[in-house]
Image: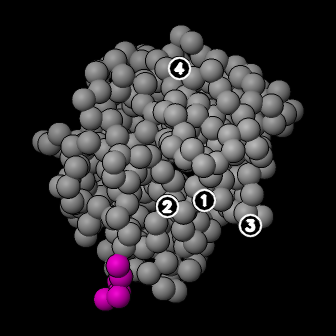
Amino acid sequence: MALFSQSSFKATGIKSLCWRGDELVDWVGGGRAFAADGSERGANVRFGYRFDAATASPDGRFAVIYQRLGTKALLLRDGRIVRELERSFYHADAYEYPVALFNSRDGRVLLAHCPRDYCRIDLEDAETGRSLTESPDRKPSDFFHSRFAVSPKAKRLLSAGWVWHPLDLVAAFDLAAAFADPRNLDGGPDLHTLFNPALAEESSACWITDDRLVIAASAEPEGNDDVEKGSGKRLQPRGLAVCDLLQQKCLQSFQLDEPAGTILPIGERFVLSLYRYPKLIDLSTGKITHAWRELRSGLQVGSIVWNSDDDAKPPPMAFDAATNRFAIVNGDTVTRIEFDLAGS
C-alpha cells in the first residue's frame, strides 16, 4: 500500500497554487510563497485582472496565470511578465483554458497553448516566444482542446477536451512527430476507437508512463449501441481504463461508484481522484486505498465547467508528478500530502 505524510498550515486569500521546489507559490496572488511550515514571503506585485488559475514549469521558474473561463493569460518568468497570451473567444466561457509548461527532451521550457484557434495546438519556446509548430499547411480538426498534460519524459501530449454536441474526449499527440511536421498536432480524438468502442464520455486523463495513460469516464451513458457492452476491457461510464498506446490495447478497466473527475498520477500504480474529495485509487484493483473526506476538491468532471456553483468549483491545488506531492486549499487551511511509494 502507498504510504503518505500529511501536514497543514494556515493562510488566507490564496488564489492559486504551484510547486517551486519545496515551496508553494500563489502566482495569481502576486508570487506569495509558503514554506512547508507555513512561513510566508509576501507578494511582489498585484495583477489587476480576473486571473483565477496558474500552472508552472517543473522547476517553478516559469508560470502562466490565466482566467479559467476567459481568454487572457500572462506568461511569467521568476514572477516578472514575459508576454501576454490569448486564446479564441469561441465558447471560452464554458471550458478550461488550454495551457501547459513542460521541459523538452533537450532541456528547454516549452509552452503548449492555443493562441490561433480553439482547435489548433501550438508549441513555443517559453524563453524566446519562438513558435516550434508554424506551418502554412496546418488544418486542425474540429476539437476543443483543454487540460493539456505532457508524459513524464516529454514524449507525448494529451488534451482532455471535447467535441460538439458536446462530448468529452481525449486526444494524444507524439511530440517528436509534431516538431518534425506540425500537422501531426491537427488530428482528431481517435483514441476512443481503440480503447472506448462503446464511446463512454472521456472526462479526464493522465499519463503514468510515456506510453501508458489512464482515462476516466463521466457517468453519462455510452453512445454506441452497436458495440457489445459486456465484451473485453474497455472504458465504461464512471470507469477508469489503463491504456497502452504502443500495444494499442486496454490493459485494465473497472467501474467506480461515482465519476473519478480529475485524475493525477501517483507513480505507475495509483491515481488520485479529485471528485468531491481526494481518493487514492489502486490501478491494479480499482479499489480506494485512502480517502480524505475532510478535504473538499470540487465536483469537476470534464473540461466544461460553466455555470458551476461556487461549492462545485475546484479550490486552488498543486501537484508535482516528479515527487508525488499534492497540495490543496480549503478555506484558510493549506494541506500538503506527500506520497512514499517505496513500499507499494
Q: Are marks 3 and 1 in contact (CB under 8 Å)?
A: no
**Residue bearing mark 3:** 246
Above or below 92: residue 157 = below
Of labels 4 and 1, earlier in sequence is 1
Q: Position of residue 249 (x, y in %)?
A: 75, 57
Q: Residues within 10 Å of mark 1 (few under 14, many from 20)?
A: few
Q: Is residue 56 left or right of residue 42?
A: right
Q: Are marks 2 and 4 in contact (CB under 8 Å)?
A: no
Going from N to C along the chain, the mark reached first, 2 or 3, is 2
The image's mark for residue 189 is: 2
SS category of the residue bearing label 4: loop
Residue on which the image places disc 4: 277
Identify the secondary structure beneath mark 1: helix
- 79 sits left or right of 214 in the view: left
In this rendering, is residue 268 above or below 154?
above
Q: Earlier in the sequence, mark 4 or mark 3?
A: 3
Q: Can I make out residue 13 in this image?
A: yes
Query: Nearer the observer, disc 3 or disc 1?
Result: 1
What's the distance in space between the residues labelled 2 and 4, CA to CA?
29 Å
Q: How many marks?
A: 4
Q: Indicate the quadrant containing the N terminus: top left, top right, bottom left or bottom right.
A: top right
| Mark 3 → mark 1, Cα distance in angstroms | 15 Å
Magenta stretch in the rendered image:
134-139
Cα gap from disc 4 to disc 1, whole angstroms: 31 Å
Residue 329 lies in quadrant: top left
Q: Is residue 127 visible?
A: no
N-terminal-most mark, 2 or 4: 2
Q: Check disc 1 and report the residue beneath it.
A: 193
Which three-letter amino acid code belongs to the residue tagged 2?
A: Pro
| Contact, mark 2 vs mark 1 (Cβ under 8 Å) | no
